[in-house]
Amino acid sequence: MVTRVASDRQGIQSIEVGFRLIDVLASNGRPMMLRDIARGAGMPAAKAHRYMVSFMRTGMIEQDSSSGRYLLGSHALEVGLSALGRLDPVRLAGPILEDLCEEIQETVALAVWGNRGATIVRIVDSGAPITIALRAGTVLPLCRSATGQAFAAFFRSPFLKQMLDQELREISEAGKIAITTARRQLEKTLTEIRRHGISRASGSLTPGINGFSAPVFDHSGMMVAAITSLGTVGEFSVEWDSRVARAMRAAASNLSRKLGFQHPEG
C-alpha cells in the first residue's frame, strides 16, 4: 500500500514537470521549436521530446508538419476555455476593489447585469464623512448614471435596448424634447465613452456626486461587469485623464486580464 502511494506521488511529479512545457508554450503565445521550449522549461531537449510525444497523443500539443514547430492543441484550448468560463468576476474583483479604494480614497463598487438592469453587487466604502447612498442590490439607470452608461456603451442585450428605449421616452417626456433628439444626445455620449474606454457622470443622478465607471470584459470579449467610483463634486474630478480615471481603467483592465480577456492591441 505504501509503495502504491509513493508511485502515485511520483506520477504527479512527472505531470508537474511535463506541464512546464505547456506553460512555456502558453506564455509565449506562438509556435516554438523543441529546443526553445526545452530551454524555457529548464530541461534537456531529449527529455522534453518524450513529454511532447505524449502531449500530442492527448491533443494538448500539436506540431506543424511544415515547420516542425509546436503549439497548443485543441484539447488544451478546450480545457482553458472551460476553466475561464468558471471564473467569477465578483470573487476576483474583491482585492482589486480594495486596492483601488485605497489608491484613490473614494468609494468603489462592482456592478453586473441583472434581471432588472445594471445592479450593484459589491461595495468598498472609503469611509469619507459624506455617505453615498449606494448598496448591494441597487439598480442604476442607464442614461443618468456612470455605471448605466458603461453598460449602455459596451454591453449587448436585447433587454438593454428595451430599457434604453423606455428611459429615452421618459427623458423625452420630462424634458419636453423630441425622442429623436434625446436618442441623438445619448449616442453622442456613448460614442465619447467608447473612445475613452470609461464613462463619467457629474451630478446627473445624485446632486453633488460625481462618478466614473469602467467596463470589465471576459475571455470572449463580452462585458461582464463594471467597476464604479464615486465622490463629491468638489474633490472628484471627472476629467478623462484624471488620476482617478487612470486608476479606474487600470483596475478594470486588471480584472479583465484575470478573466482571460486579451486586449486587441496585445
Image (tube, rainbow, N blue to C red):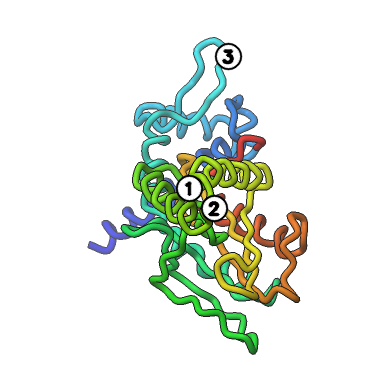
Q: Is residue 172 above or below residue 98?
A: above
The residue under the point 37% across, 36% down is: 78
Q: Secondary structure at mark 1?
A: strand
Instruction: Left or right? Give the position of 87 relative to 192.
Output: left
Q: Secondary structure at mark 3?
A: loop
Instruction: Left or right? Give the position of 50 relative to 29.
Output: left
The residue under the point 77% across, 61% down is: 242
Q: Secondary structure at mark 2?
A: helix
Q: Position of residue 139 (x, y in %)?
A: 41, 65
Taking the view exactly as shown, the residue that stands out farthest to the bottom is: 129
How much space separates mark 2 and mark 3, taking CA atoms?
45 Å
Residue 211 or residue 43, whichever sits in front: 211
Q: Where is mark 1, residue-wise? A: 223
Q: Where is mark 2, residue-wise? A: 150
Labels 2 & 3 near each other (Cβ < 8 A): no
Q: Amino acid at mark 1?
A: Met
Between disc 2 and disc 1, the foreground one is 2
Q: Position of residue 258 (x, y in %)?
A: 53, 53
Q: Earlier in the sequence, mark 2 or mark 3?
A: 3
Q: Position of residue 82 (x, y in %)?
A: 36, 44
Classify mark 2: residues with Cα within 10 Å, few (<14), some (14-19) or many (20+). Answer: many
Asked whether residue 42 appears in the rendered view, the answer is no
